[in-house]
Amino acid sequence: MFEARKVDLVLQGHDHCYSRLTSEAGKTASARARADGGIQGPVYLVSVTGSKMYGLNDRAGTQPDRVAEDTQLYQVIDVQADRLLLRTRTATGRLYDGFDLIRQAGGGNRLVETGGLIDVRRCDGATGPDAIACTARTKD
């Protein structure tokens, strides 16, 4: 339905982790489409701001383009005539994820990822990549 209606961005919350997905075929297919300048979308994004966190499932390493667990995040979105700019930041303001969706003359969007991002937030045992304790729990 979203593809048929040419929806650019689908936002949702309440999953207690972060995930951005641009291709059902997985992040390798998404990266290839971006490198080739291909049309992408809709972009599906799930985020979390609260303190309750879940660990990511086994598909998190291959399907979404960018993920985070045990991290409070918020989004800033700027909509312009021919583009949508989305930036995801940590609660302390660090740039975690970002992209521009650039409307193409023939329809559809080209996705350009933002550089300068901090490391992917995945918990490995008791701590995350910044040595801060992980509180995320595995979702049954």
Image: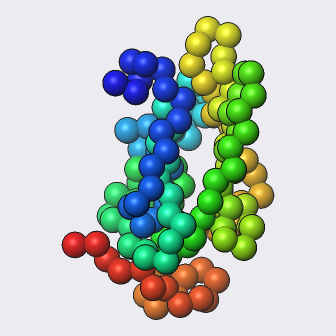
Q: Is residue 99 left or right of residue 2?
A: right
Q: Is residue 60 visible?
A: yes
Q: Is residue 130 left or right of residue 69?
A: right
Residue 63, percent across and down? 40, 50
Residue 72 appears in which quarter of the rendering? Answer: bottom right
Q: Is residue 29 visible?
A: no
Q: For the point 53% across and 90% down, which residue is it?
A: 133
* Outermost residue toward the top in this view: 106
> Which quadrant is home to the C terminus?
bottom left
Residue 117 appears in which quarter of the rendering? Answer: bottom right
Q: For the point 60% across and 24% down, which residue is it?
A: 109
Q: For the point 49% across and 77% down, which residue is it?
A: 51
Q: Is residue 3 left or right of residue 114?
A: left
Residue 135, percent across and down? 45, 85
Q: For the point 50% across and 64% down, which residue is it?
A: 48
- Towards the viewer: 124 or 18: 18
Vertical placement of residue 136 versus 29, above or below: below
Vertical placement of residue 30 versus 70, above or below: above
> Which quadrant is home to the N terminus?
top left
- Towards the viewer: 122 or 93: 93
Residue 33, percent across and down? 55, 31
Residue 137, percent across and down? 35, 80
* Image color mode: rainbow
Q: How many marks?
A: 0
